[in-house]
Amino acid sequence: MSEPELRASPITPTVDFSAEGIQHGFLRLPYSRDDSAWGSVMIPVTVVKNGEGPTALLTGGNHGDEYEGPIALFDLARTLKVEDVSGRIIIIPAMNYPAFVAGTRTSPIDKGNMNRSFPGRPDGTVTPKIADYFQRTLLPLADIVLDFHSGGKTLDFLPFCAAHILPDKAQEERAFELVKAFSAPYSMKMLEIDTVGMYDTAAEEMGKVFVTTELGGGGTATARSAGIAKRGVANVLRGAGILAGKAEVPSTQWLDMPDGDCFSFAEEGGLIEPLVDLGETVVKNQAVARIYPLGRTGTQPSEVLAKMDGMLCARHFPGLVKAGDCVAVLAITV
Ligand SMILES: [Zn+2]
């Protein structure tokens, strides 16, 4: 039985992806609502094309409260010179634009988490409509894909660029070459908690060379983390042969997330006392945090234990924690 054919995307780009030169415009998505009957979501996009060559698709703001990617990509869009490009660069600094404008992880319109919305739907709400446009229009144009993430308001990460272990070893190797080119302070062989609906998975299943990052967190950026993002994206473009110039390549520490024991979750809520900071090492069964009940004094805090030896590469950021929150992520140095 064949699948019913999907309708066309409602998104109209104001740029021509096949035109030479630099264009700044929008992906216009009709969104009829109380304050704008025939209104639209206007997602900023820049396209730079100069002759033949590979296409890089660069995205930030997949989650709306992660800032290193948008900073690096707004900066790149205003500073790129067409004569330095061989091929094409498509820049979308804020993929889930409504979430980015609201400063939230998910969309305020439909609560859509962009990185759980793939392959999307052309007849869905706003977030799956954007995902569908990436799935059927933008990803097919791309050879390499760089999607920036950070911890957002609830996680904080050691700054790393990452790729995934893939069934196609040639595709995996090309991805790790770009991770190496990015040259973040840390480089990760990344394990996901749940790959269903991820942009990463959509791109990888299409055979694209996909790299991602986690560059900090807490719902903000620092001068250091923004600098890592800006240098990293230029390095990736140079590594892919799309941007002229010499890459600045500082040393990186490689990390691996071997299995689900990397993750420690809170089993109850309360006031969290970190016992280990990012970049510090722990041994199996060592307490990484205490959780104090909020309601009374004189009670013992519970402890969150490391399930393996490793380095703390991510942690829960807010001072209060809820049952089920990811408290700590460990990785091993390789
Ligand atoms: Zn994210």
Image (cartoon, grey):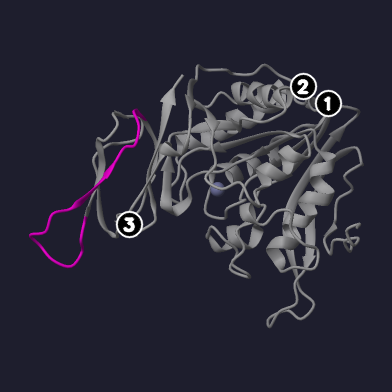
Query: Is residue 34 depicted above or below 21 in this figure?
Result: below
Identified at 61% across, 32% down, the residue is: 164
Residue 225: horizontal and vertical position, in percent? 48, 36
Residue range corresponding to the magenta coloring: 292-310
| Mark toward the start of the polypeptide (2 vs 1) | 1
Quickly name the residue at label 3.
321
Q: Is residue 185 visible?
A: no
Residue in the foreground of this view, choosing between 25 and 299: 299
Residue in the foreground of this view, choosing between 14 and 10: 10
Q: Which mark is residue 241?
A: 2
**Is ligand 1 within 8 Å of the beta carbon of the residue shown at mark 1?**
no
Q: Given this view, does label 3 or label 1 mark the residue nearer the observer?
A: 3
194 on left or right of 167: left
Q: Given this view, does label 2 or label 1 mark the residue nearer the observer?
A: 2
Q: Residue furthest left?
A: 298
Q: Which amino acid does the dot numbered 1 rest on?
A: Ser
Q: Are marks 3 and 1 in contact (CB under 8 Å)?
A: no
Q: Which amino acid does the dot numbered 3 rest on?
A: Val
**Separation of residues labelled 3 and 1 (CA atoms):** 48 Å
Identified at 73% across, 22% down, the residue is: 170
Residue 16: horizontal and vertical position, in percent? 89, 48
| Quarter of the picture holding the N terminus | bottom right
Q: Are marks 2 and 1 in contact (CB under 8 Å)?
A: yes
Identified at 68% across, 47% down, the residue is: 199
Secondary structure mostly taken by the magenta-highlighted segment of the chain: loop
Dot 2: within a 10 Å radius of its alpha carbon, few (fewer than 14), some, or many (20 or more) residues? some
62 on left or right of 251: right
**Separation of residues labelled 2 and 3 (CA atoms):** 45 Å
Q: Is residue 151 visible?
A: yes
Q: Is residue 262 magenta?
A: no
